[in-house]
Amino acid sequence: MEAILSIRDLVKVYGKETRALNGISLDFYPGEFIVVIGPSGAGKSTFIRCINRLVDPTAGDIVFDSQHMEKLSGRKLRDQRSKIGMIFQHYNLVSRTNVIKNVLHGQLSNTPLYKSLLGLYSQQDKQEAVELLKKVGLEDQMYKRADALSGGQMQRVGICRALLQRPKILLADEPIASLDPVSANIVMQQLHSISIEKQLTCVVNLHQVDYAKRYASRIIGIKKGEVVFDGSPSHLTDSIVRDIYEGKESQMTLQNKGGAASAFVNEDRQVSGAEQ
Ligand SMILES: Nc1ncnc2c1ncn2[C@@H]1O[C@H](COP(=O)(O)OP(=O)(O)OP(=O)(O)O)[C@@H](O)[C@H]1O
């Protein structure tokens, strides 16, 4: 099978000294549900954000859907990025806009500006948005403002928005870190079943090893910017987990990380998520 994403010798150095990624090479295949684990500061976020160029890599190749992401800019980068769905820890919804419009924002890159400003989305997009909301059990919440939802519901809207892009790959950066365990489980279950149903490759950063083991088809362990484990959940033994988190066991079950940050993007701005 041909890889949908091939990463070679990926390096990211922030400033002069912080080597966040130190030569990562990985191939991801259609339908894989990949969970990336590792202690705080290991480079998980940097890794996932290099894939869609929210972070610019220092060196290395990122070949996604037959194009070198690291070489693209302008329109070509935007086009390629539109095939990559992104789910954020803090959801990045537009708070005063209703649920269905937030989902339709997933089609922004394929909708002329004047149409999106007037809310003129195609009938097909609207129908698909409704179908997606039904799939995650939010059909009754469609016309509610996003800020009236619970965290778990907001994240499910975030999933629908990403899926309406009709992505070829889905990236999720700590999607359940701000959720209670029940909501976290629902979000992970839905992501997982959508990945299987659509044969959609998902790359999910998680702090919780137990969720990684429960849902991943493949686990990648990152430590100090390097891949130290790449295999199936059944091969991730307790001793390997201890090695990955060496001296940082408390990270393994961390439920809430930075939960105080805002769940919403600026009203007038669509998601950028760039945090360079
Ligand atoms: N914008 C930035 N500028 C400078 N250094 C950064 C930046 N972002 C991340 N780093 C550094 O790069 C390293 C990797 O950080 P990264 O956020 O990718 O790790 P992580 O595994 O996602 O951590 P966490 O689980 O805590 O989010 C860390 O040393 C971090 O301090």
Image (cartoon, rainbow, N blue to C red):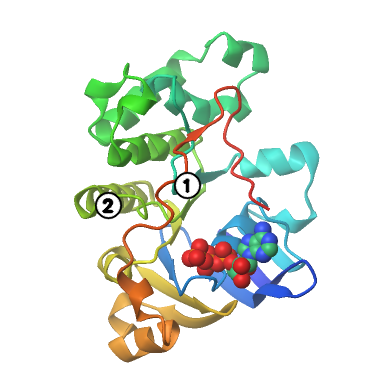
Q: Amino acid at mark 2?
A: Ala
**Horizontal and vertical percent for residue 58?**
77, 66
Image check: 43 left or right of 190? right
List the residue tagged with mark 2: 184
Is residue 54 something one can see in this rendering? Answer: yes
Name above or below for residue 198 compared with residue 102.
below
Q: Residues within 10 Å of mark 2 (few under 14, many from 20)?
A: many
Q: Residue at x 40, y 58 (%)?
A: 257
Q: Residue at x 40, y 79 (%)?
A: 231
Q: Amino acid at mark 1?
A: Phe
**Horizontal and vertical percent for residue 255?**
31, 60
Name the one closer to the observer, 253 or 61: 253
Name the one closer to the observer, 30 or 111: 111
**Horizontal and vertical percent for residue 165?**
51, 35
Reading the chain from its start, which is encountered first: label 1 or label 2?
Answer: 1
Q: Residues within 10 Å of mark 1 (few under 14, many from 20)?
A: many
**Horizontal and vertical percent for residue 242?**
36, 87
Q: In what element is the residue under mark 1?
A: loop
Name above or below for residue 144 compared with residue 164.
above
Q: Residue at x 47, y 39 (%)?
A: 262
Q: In what element is the residue under mark 2?
A: helix
List the residue tagged with mark 1: 88
Q: Quadrant of residue 216?
A: bottom left
User: Alpha carbon of mark 1 to alpha carbon of mark 2: how far?
Assistant: 13 Å
Name above or below for residue 26 compared with residue 104.
below
Name the one closer to the observer, 166 or 141: 141
Residue found at the far front of this picture: 260
Which mark is drawn over residue 32?
A: none
Q: Quadrant holding ligand 1?
A: bottom right
Name the one closer to the observer, 267 or 136: 267
Is residue 2 something one can see in this rendering? Answer: no
Name above or below for residue 28 compared with residue 98.
below
